[in-house]
Amino acid sequence: MYDEELYGMHLQELRRGTVVLACLIILKEPNYGYALLDQLERSGFAVDANTLYPLLRRLEKQGLLASDWNTDEARPRKFYRTSDDGHALADALTADWTDLNTAFRSLRGE
């Protein structure tokens, strides 16, 4: 049996990079933060809003996301979308993810 606290710490570390890739993939279609948070959770990525919004700002600053404000509704919303650089990175990371998954399966004898 393993220590739950230790497991949680390593699980968080494992998921940190996968959330970046998930956001880049999901935001190929423009979306705003709260809807993205909901879509991530429905897809199995448990992400806290206090983690997601700084991540979105960081990815935008890195040029991987672009954003626009939608002021057509009563409540303005910032919509994010994956930039061309973000698409290229998502494709490269997805290929690496596939290679890693193959390597892990090989290690497990599958």
Image (spheres, rainbow, N blue to C red):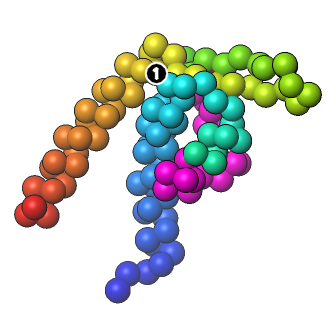
Residue 9, above or below 33: below
Tag 1's secondary structure? helix
Residue 27, above or below 20: above
The image quadrant where one finds the N terminus is: bottom left
Which residue is found at the position 45% from the left and 72% from the top?
A: 6
The image quadrant where one finds the C terminus is: bottom left
Q: Main secondary structure of the magenta part?
A: helix
The reply, left or right, for residue 21 in relation to residue 96 is right
Q: Amino acid at mark 1?
A: Gly
Residue 87's image quarter?
A: top left
Q: Which residue is the extreme one toward the right?
A: 74
Residue 32 drawn at (x, y percent): 69, 32
Residue 56, above or below 62: below
Callout 1: 10 Å neighbours few (<14), some, many (20+)?
A: many
Residue 99 drawn at (x, y percent): 19, 40
Magenta highlight range: 40-60
Residue 85 drawn at (x, y percent): 45, 15
Which residue is found at the position 84% from the left and 19% from the top?
A: 72
The reply, left or right, for residue 76 in relation to residue 29 is right
Residue 68's image quarter?
A: top right
Residue 88's image quarter?
A: top left
Q: Report if residue 105 is visible in the image.
A: yes
Asked if residue 57 is among those painted magenta in the image, a careful observer would answer yes
> For this rendering, which residue is in front, 95 or 63?
95
Asked if residue 87 is among those painted magenta in the image, a careful observer would answer no
> For this rendering, which residue is in front, 72 or 57?
72
Q: Which residue is mark 1?
A: 86
